[in-house]
Image (spheres, rainbow, N blue to C red):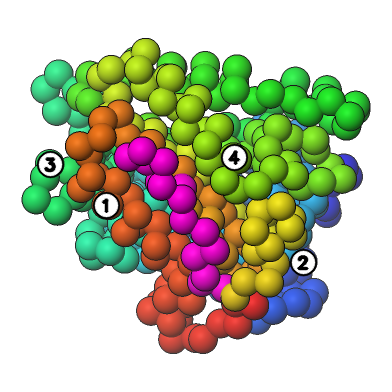
Amino acid sequence: MSLLPVDDWNDLRALLAQGGELAGFADYIAESLCTHLGQDWLADYKKREKGYWLTAQLAQFWNPRRWDLLDLALSFDLLRGQKGMESLLKQLRNNPSSISQAGVQIRLARLEFRRSSTVSVEEPAEHGTWKPDLIVKVEGERAMRVECRKLSIGTKALEVQQDRKQPFDPWTRIGDALHEKAAQVSQDNGWICMELDDGSFGPNGWMTGNYVGRSFEEVAADIYLKVHQFLKASPAVAGVVLLTRPDLDSAHNSAHNSTSTARTGDVVSTISIAASEAHLFTLCGSRASKVFVVPARSDQVTQVTAWRDLFSLDPSWTEWASEELLGREIDCV
């Protein structure tokens, strides 16, 4: 994939303004990201990452990526002044490569802010505990301390891309990443939230992922079994949440319950397996996302409910934030 000619925020502004439903937000997106990240951030990222972020974020699926950029700009403005946000932004300015990891934190933080009007990221460590990426409130119980992780495309997946007849199994990498995070989380019986952008849900024609072409029910059952096995081997971890990146793959794949015919904001499917839940819903920009919540114990009903309530706000978040911050309605279809 060739790089798009985006070297600074003005280039990004011009690219966004070329057409489509978000052309009118081009100035806002570029100005917001420049304000929060800094004038030289984009060039610095390209220099460090050799353009990978731009390739992955912008070149392949331009429509969902520009919606992601709007969500990021709205999130930065909405969460301004919230506990830990300045520390997180400082990390992003000093280390642009951390944008991938921070994106998962920000996705959860903006939903928690809408739900409870306050949010805490980069929470200081308590005595004997680790420094969680995010705090998720639970009614009537102690808040959940959450460690976030983004799992991106790996070398093995890219190799398999050359032989699309052979699906790759992502669970070696996913399992390794979960065990790595478990070493931190187990200090305080916390949760792990991981966004999968590793190719396992890759769209047909580009990546032969392990879950491409399989029904949502089959995927949910497989993920439950594998995560449950991990939790049995990691008894101090409270639970795992796996997310898929908001993308076109679910929305255009009939094997995933025909989400292309669903309206924005629809919860297309909800599945319960034992104490776990899986949700498939649509988002602005013809995107869709899946969420798999697997608790360690069957009595964690309140925590599972808290996750369900949190992600139920995701489908309408962009519309809500645009009206809340900018006073502008947005056509999400």
Residue 80 visible to an observer of this rendering: no
| Direction from residue 214 to residue 110 in the image, left or right | left
Q: Name the residue under label 4.
A: 219
Tell me the mark number nearer the camera, choosing from 1 and 4: 4
Q: Mark 1 points at which residue?
A: 306
Amino acid identity at mark 2: Leu
Tell me the mark number nearer the camera, choosing from 2 and 3: 3
> What are the residue bounds of the magenta stretch?
264-278
Position of residue 293 measured from the top left corner of the image (x, y, whole percent): 40, 42
The answer to which of marks 2 and 3 sits earlier in the sequence is: 2
User: Could you tell me which residue is drawn at 20 percent across and 47 percent down?
Assistant: 302
Q: Name the residue under label 2.
A: 15
| Direction from residue 13 to residue 87 in the image, left or right | left
The answer to which of marks 4 and 2 sits earlier in the sequence is: 2
Amino acid identity at mark 1: Ala
Alpha carbon distance from label 1 to label 4: 23 Å
Dominant secondary-structure state across the stretch colored magenta = strand
